[in-house]
Image: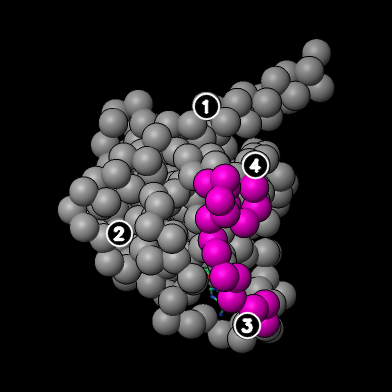
Amino acid sequence: MSRKPEKLIDKKGLRLDGRKPDELRPIKIEVGVLPNTDGSAYIQQGKNKILAGVYGPRELHPKHLALPDRTVLRCRYRMAPFSVQERKSPAPSRRDIELSKVIREALEPSVFLEYYPRTGIDIHIEVLQADGGTRCASITAASLALADAGIPMQDLVTACAAGKVDNTIVLDLMDTEDKEGGADVPVALMPNLNAITLLQMDGILSLEEFEKAANLALEGCRKIYPMQKEALKAKYVSVKEVEE
Ligand code: ADP
């Protein structure tokens, strides 16, 4: 394991990876990367590498879970054994189960669930490499995978975290900042509707610090949203070019 760094913010106010407090990690998003799914997306956010694949709407198994008035959204978040420094057991941990629920609940408000009664939509999230903030990056990618599957949605969902390290409020925490820092506030937003679908807090913040962190996380979401739209457009432009 790596040693605890003495300072998370240096004298110039820069973070361990050279970022300013309000700077996102480099983000790369691709849509339609898994041809065997109905919709898919891949995101790299700093050292995070995450794949999301969607199946559905389709007949639900087991059938007794089906609902007469809407589709059932199911989500499975999984970290690969090689995604962290020490091998993670492939069995779902309590954290994996919790994050699967949290991610599903963050995406559910964006989908017109009532359009597809008696069916199910499955979202599979595979974290290939983790470096803090995987729940947020997973939401950003999974929302794109749903859109890629052609599922009618009110808006995309974009997620980002902010938190406190060395008494400074910072955007988009990486693993060391998450573990050694004071607090973490993950937020998910439907940017066009300006509606928040996830708000969590881990650690201790004063009311003012919390407001500052939540607003910074929302700002982060608004910066990621155009990248999501760009990635969606890029897939369909390339499909059009192949057809022509
Ligand atoms: P998030 O990834 O959304 O920030 P957590 O705060 O629970 O969720 O986790 C923070 C980070 O801790 C993860 O992104 C990952 O880098 C690391 N981590 C999570 N689970 C493990 C594990 N089993 N072993 C080592 N590192 C882990």
How many numbered dots are placed on residues in this image? 4
- Per the image, the residue denoted by label 1 is 226
Query: Quick check: 134 left or right of 121?
Result: right
Amino acid on which disc 3 is placed: Lys
Against 28, residue 120 (above or below) is below
Q: Is residue 88 visible?
A: yes
Q: Which quadrant holds residue 153?
A: top left
**Contact flag, marks 3 and 2 (Cβ < 8 Å):** no
Q: Pick whichever of labels 1 and 3 is earlier in the sequence.
A: 3
Mark 4: secondary structure: loop
Q: How far is the residue under mark 2 from the one under mark 1?
A: 24 Å
Using the rendered view, name the quadrant where residue 145 is placed. top right
The image quadrant that residue 2 belongs to is bottom right
| x, y percent for residue 35 | 72, 46
If you read the primary sequence from the N terminus, does the residue marked by circle 1 or circle 4 appear first? 4
Q: Quadrant of the N terminus?
A: bottom right
Which mark is on residue 200? 2
Query: Dot 3: what SS?
Result: loop
What secondary structure is marked by label 2? loop
Please state the extent of the stretch shown in magenta in the rendering. 1-18
